[in-house]
Amino acid sequence: MTHADRLRHPENCPALVLNADYTPLSYYPLSLWPWQTAVKAMFLERVDIVAHYDREVHSPSATLQLPSVIALRQYVKPNEYPAFTRFNLFLRDKFACVYCGNGNELTFDHVIPRRHGGRTSWENVATACAPCNLKKGGRTPKEAHMPILGGDPIRPTSWQLLDHGRGFPPNHLHESWHDYLYWDVELEA
């Protein structure tokens, strides 16, 4: 199978899922459904098809063009606060170590170590590169003489992550998705 054939394979044709107001259901991670889920939702009349891929799937009795953008018919209220995940933590800290600013070998660090009663929470976990995490060890930033750049960790809102995420677009964006992902970017003159 050639590279072009792999790209055209249905498994590589996820649908961008928009809310009923035509904004992405989520940005981080980007709301994508596998083609099978999108087609099922289409047949159950839960979504409207907004755009298609130049790709079809066939059954013995029908041919269907795969949806590339779908919109939910019922509005889903977005969460004010994002899930506490490693990706969202890195996104909050802009994919850089809070101690030195390095963007390589990222891991996470308990600002107040767990052995000192520190919890695994937005307010106590920060992005750290492996060398800084090792250097800090089981000490507080003050004990290690390693101040946190930009201040103490916070629980971000979904809007704060969205704002940070504009600098880190997903690796693959189908051309049919662009109109729905970047409504608030400055237009070219």
Image: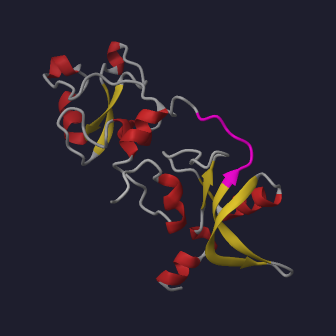
The residue at the point 41 percent across, 60 percent down is: 171
Seen as rendered, the residue at the extreme right is 61
Q: In the depicted view, which residue is nearer to us: 110 or 58?
A: 58
Main secondary structure found in the magenta portion = loop
Rendered location of residue 107, percent (x, y): 32, 40
Answer with left or right where residue 136 lies relative to residue 58: left
| Residue 88 in the figure: left or right of residue 35 | left
| Quadrant where the C terminus is found in the figure | bottom left
Q: Quadrant of residue 100?
A: top left
Is residue 137 placed above or below 171 in the rendered structure?
above
Query: x and y percent of residue 26 in the render?
Result: 55, 44
Residue at left 59%, top 35%?
78
User: What is the quadrant of residue 56 in the picture?
Assistant: bottom right
Q: Is residue 127 left or right of residue 132?
A: right
Q: Is residue 86 visible?
A: no
Q: Is residue 131 magenta?
A: no
Q: Position of residue 169 (x, y in %)?
A: 40, 54
In this rendering, the answer to whether 76 lies above or below 105 is above
Q: In percent of the image, x 42 and y 29: which residue is there?
A: 156
The residue stretch that appears in magenta: 71-78
Magenta-drawn stretch contains 75:
yes
Residue 19 visible in rendering: yes
**Of 57 and 99, which appears nearest the observer?**
57
Percent x, y for residue 125?
Answer: 36, 27
Nearest the eye: 131 or 19: 19
Task: Single out the residue that lies furthest toward the left.
Answer: 145
Residue under the image location 50 percent in, 82 percent down: 4
Residue at the extreme top of the image, as rendered: 117
| Quarter location, residue 92 | top left
Quarter of the figure with the N terminus: bottom right
Q: Please, is residue 174 above or below residue 76 in the view?
A: below
Query: Relative to 106, does residue 65 appear above or below in the rendering?
Result: below
